[in-house]
Image (cartoon, rainbow, N blue to C red):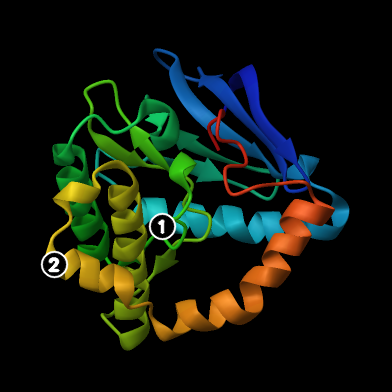
Amino acid sequence: MAWAQIRVLKADLFGRVEQVHLSERGPKILAVRRDIAAARWWVRWLARSLARREQRALLALDGLDAVPRALGADRNASLRSWLEGEPMHLAQPPSIEYFAQAHRLLVQLHRRGITHNDLAKEPNWLVTPSGQPALIDFQLASVHPRRSKLFRVKGREDLRHLLKHKRSYCPESLTDRERGILAKKSWPSRIWMRTGKPVYLFVTRRVLGWSDREGAGDRN
């Protein structure tokens, strides 16, 4: 598919993320291109795996307006449609209704058997020009053919991370049930906090110089 680069959104060990115009046929379409070939050789296999994971999840969500559309992928790159919007932490969600709509969006994902698995990051939540929520960056998303126990655990974590953002922006609107969900972490989350997260923070912050808002001013 023919494309023309508009700007680089992000570049790191895992390649380059670009905003592009697709213009093979008909009117030009705004899209996001992950350049896997630009990844460092020792993590290129992982970049390909993450790109395949994202494409698979987006194909399962085809037709849902608040997520990008999968536009194709090969060994060197993947494409998805561009969504207009600002990251949550820049746009500052305008109302309690935003979080009600975000919850409905999560329900739609989960009904299709998709868990996002990376909703703690505010840059993955967009506020569209009309003030509605949208989601990007499905590289860690899971496709679940059935509603297994693992699916339910991951779905609850998606919801808990949304509620953490709601607590940051609209704490007075939390219900007693929502406070209960926030207070009770799942067992994978407890294990992660005690074992995996310290290692993750050391590698990303000390070794790679990233933060939880890496790319926060960009679109990844």
For badge 1, the amino acid type reads Ala
**Location of residue 201 (image quadrant):** bottom right
Q: Nearer the viewer, residue 121 or 43?
A: 121
User: Does 117 appear above or below 99?
Assistant: below
Q: Nearer the viewer, residue 89 or 125?
A: 89
Residue 176, label in figure: 2
For badge 2, the amino acid type reads Asp
**Quadrant in which the C terminus appears:** top right
Q: What's the residue at 60%, 80% (across, down)?
A: 194
Residue 57, label in figure: 1
Q: Earlier in the sequence, mark 1 or mark 2?
A: 1
Q: What's the residue at 22%, 66% (across, down)?
A: 179
Can residue 61 be seen here? Answer: no
| 114 relative position to 28: left or right | left
Q: Position of residue 192 (x, y in %)?
A: 56, 77
Q: Secondary structure at mark 1?
A: helix
Q: Position of residue 117 (x, y in %)?
A: 44, 63
**Location of residue 158 (image quadrant):** bottom left
| 117 relative position to 196: left or right | left
Can residue 181 be seen here? Answer: yes
| 73 relative position to 15: left or right | left
Q: Position of residue 58 (x, y in %)?
A: 39, 51
Q: What's the residue at 25%, 38% (across, down)?
A: 65
Q: Residues within 10 Å of mark 1 (few under 14, many from 20)?
A: many
Q: Secondary structure at mark 2?
A: helix
**Location of residue 92 (image quadrant):** top left
Q: What's the residue at 35%, 56% (across, down)?
A: 164
User: Does 78 appear above or below 1?
Assistant: below
Q: Nearer the viewer, residue 66 or 177?
A: 177
User: Does 76 appear above or below 120?
Assistant: above
Q: Residues within 10 Å of mark 2 (few under 14, many from 20)?
A: few
**Quadrant in which the N terminus appears:** top right
